[in-house]
């Protein structure tokens, strides 16, 4: 396995992605991980990531030179290469011109890092400092027009540096360079496959759990579904999945989750807790979005806790924490380096007093989907669009009333049905209906109407942080609008939200 030491580059996670695509297992840890821990990790090779700092700045993040005495190959990327240069007595200076974007790399030596690659190809640069003089024992193995030391090597000690970013897709053959480092130079075996992962995790789960029982909150979303499927394969009916019906779910959602896990997966102990009355009761009269979120969050924990207590011999709680939630991200700001570590975002509180099982801790989202497929989960779950925890409550503006929920559920079902029929569901990040508690005047037949408004929202996004509204075809919008007005009683007007994020958010509340 490969150890990636993170110096705060926005691309660090991509290094891990590229290696895993080549079936090489790797982990990301902060640059200041103690040397003892690194030894314990027993890496076959170490990669030093890029980062925003300058090596000659007094407080810049560094590593101990001991790292290079471990006898394993080291590859420094961008800042990582500058750090190697600095530590071994070379010279790094501020570049007169920052180099961002494409450059043509000319390979000078094809024997290891660039094995099997063409003489010239495009690489992606992004740096403000550059190496002026390389340390003794090092030699250049590639150059660009502006950088005579675009890649360097100390052949004897197996230390490598590249000034460009092999981990980004804009670098041609970047994945091949990382593969060469991991497999050719470090001797890693490409054994990181889903099948191996499943076997390994199942064994581990069985050993951990023994004859105790495990509970999990199953929402029907991708992560919790994959956790449940994996645990069920490992320990069968020792798994007690709990599904909380908050009364804020979409049309047919509870039934569909029940069908999948009870009937298809034969989870005998799958338990549905219908708490819709409690949630609706507590939301009565509440209009503030954050207040609604708080009430829903607390109530969920309360309901889940109560259900969990009724399960005999339960000692473990399984959760779908993913790798991006776990990585201790490094942020290097100004002269002093501060480290933020964030664990387990959005999990259930510790006071529940269960031991945690987090079998997805090492996986990225697309790996979770792949795992789900291996485990036989239906595509409808694997490709499901995100749905917020507070559910329809934040898609009804202001107070949540049963009457509004009923209208929104019907309208939302139509939006999803038409989007799916048009073949767009998988291409869109989220698509849904929002209920607006305003009445407007309309005419249906010969009768004046005074009914509510439904807003349709469809956005494209990569991670939900920024989003663009989708230019849905007019005829699709027309069908959605006609159907909602004709089929959903209480609605006489449909509008389409044409706001991007920023300045809008995806949800209306
Ligand atoms: P916004 O509305 O902030 O949403 O642009 C970004 C993404 O987060 C989801 N979202 C939530 N998910 N609890 C959740 O679990 C929440 O309170 C919540 N609010 C927004 C939203 O659906 C979108 O995918």
Image (cartoon, grey):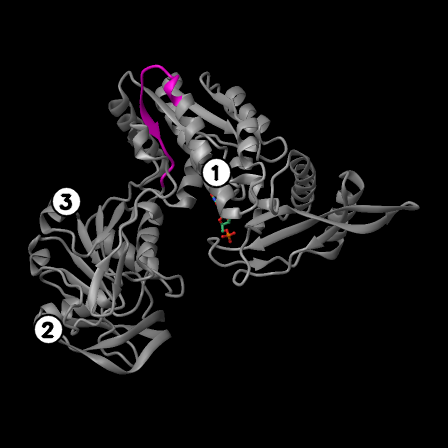
Residue at the extreme bottom: 96
Numbered disc 3: secondary structure: loop
**For residue 164, which numbered disc appears in the image?**
none
Measure how far apart labels 1 and 3 are at the Cα level.
47 Å
**For residue 42, which numbered disc appears in the image?**
3
Numbered disc 1: secondary structure: helix
Residue 439 picture location, percent across and down: 75, 49
Q: Describe residue 148's horizontal placement relative to residue 445 as left or right.
A: left
Residue 508 picture location, percent across and down: 58, 52
Q: Describe residue 284's horizontal placement relative to residue 438 as left or right.
A: left
Q: Which of marks 2 and 1 is in front?
A: 1
Chain part drawn in magenta: 308-321
Q: How many labels does the image show?
A: 3
- Viewer-closest of 435 and 30: 435
- Position of 39 relative to 354 (above/below): below
Name the residue at 10% across, 73% down.
Answer: 135
**For residue 135, which numbered disc appears in the image?**
2
Q: Looking at the rendering, which quadrant does residue 281 occupy?
A: top right
- Position of 57 relative to 307 (above/below): below
- Position of 35 relative to 410 (above/below): below
Q: Which of marks 2 and 3 is nearer the N terminus?
A: 3
Measure how far apart labels 2 and 3 are at the Cα level.
27 Å
Q: Which of marks 2 and 1 is nearer the N terminus?
A: 2
Q: Is residue 198 in the magenta section?
A: no
User: Does label 1 point to a residue whose CB lies under 8 Å from ligand 1?
Assistant: no
Q: What residue is shown with label 1?
A: 295
Name the residue at 50% across, 24% down.
Answer: 261
- Viewer-closest of 380 and 254: 254
| Residue 205 in view in this figure | yes
Numbered disc 2: secondary structure: loop
- Viewer-closest of 258 and 409: 409
């Amino acid at each position: 396995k490969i150890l990636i030491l993170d110096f705060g580059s926005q691309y660090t996670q991509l290094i891990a992605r590229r290696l895993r695509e080549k079936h090489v297992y790797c982990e990301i840890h902060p640059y200041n991980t103690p040397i003892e821990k690194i030894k314990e990790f027993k890496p076959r090779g170490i990669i030093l990531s890029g980062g925003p700092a300058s090596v000659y700045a007094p407080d810049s993040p560094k590593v101990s030179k001991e790292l290079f005495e471990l006898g394993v190959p080291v590859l420094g990327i961008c800042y990582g290469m500058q750090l190697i240069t600095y530590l071994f007595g070379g010279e790094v200076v501020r570049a007169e011109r920052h180099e961002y974007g494409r450059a043509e790399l000319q390979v000078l030596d094809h024997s290891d890092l660039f094995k099997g690659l063409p003489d010239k190809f495009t690489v992606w640069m992004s740096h403000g400092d550059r190496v002026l003089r390389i340390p003794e024992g090092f030699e250049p193995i590639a150059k660009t027009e502006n950088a005579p030391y675009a890649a360097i090597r100390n052949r004897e000690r197996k230390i490598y540096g590249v000034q460009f970013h092999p981990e980004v897709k804009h670098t041609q053959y970047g994945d091949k360079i990382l593969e060469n480092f991991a497999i050719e130079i470090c001797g890693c075996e490409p054994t990181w496959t889903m099948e191996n992962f499943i076997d390994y995790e199942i064994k581990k789960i069985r050993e951990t759990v023994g004859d105790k029982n495990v509970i999990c909150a199953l929402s029907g979303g991708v992560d919790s579904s994959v956790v449940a499927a994996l645990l069920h394969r490992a320990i069968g009916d020792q798994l007690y999945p709990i599904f909380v019906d908050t009364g804020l779910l979409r049309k047919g959602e509870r039934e569909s989750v029940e069908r999948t896990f009870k009937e298809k997966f034969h989870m005998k102990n799958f338990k549905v807790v219908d708490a819709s009355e409690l949630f609706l009761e507590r939301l009565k009269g509440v209009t503030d979005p954050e207040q609604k979120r708080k009430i829903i969050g607390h109530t969920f924990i309360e309901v889940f806790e109560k259900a969990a207590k009724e399960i005999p011999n339960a000692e473990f709680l399984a959760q779908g924490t993913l790798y991006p939630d776990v990585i201790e991200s490094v942020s290097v700001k100004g002269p002093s380096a501060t480290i933020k570590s964030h664990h387990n975002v959005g999990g259930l509180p510790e006071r529940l007093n269960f031991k945690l099982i987090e079998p997805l801790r090492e996986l990225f989202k697309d790996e979770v989907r792949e795992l789900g497929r291996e485990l036989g989960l239906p595509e409808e779950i694997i490709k499901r669009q995100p749905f917020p925890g507070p559910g329809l409550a934040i898609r009804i503006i202001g107070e949540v009333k049963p009457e509004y929920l009923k209208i929104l559920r019907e309208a939302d079902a139509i939006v999803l049905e038409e989007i799916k029929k048009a073949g767009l569901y998988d291409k869109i990040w989220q698509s849904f209906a929002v209920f607006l508690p305003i009445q407007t005047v309309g005419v249906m037949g010969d009768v004046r109407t005074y009914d509510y408004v439904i807003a349709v929202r469809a956005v494209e996004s990569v991670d939900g942080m920024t989003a663009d509204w989708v230019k849905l075809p007019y005829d699709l919008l027309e069908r959605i609008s006609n159907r909602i007005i004709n089929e959903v009683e209480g609605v006489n007007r449909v509008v389409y939200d044409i706001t991007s994020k920023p300045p809008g958010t995806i949800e209306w509340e």
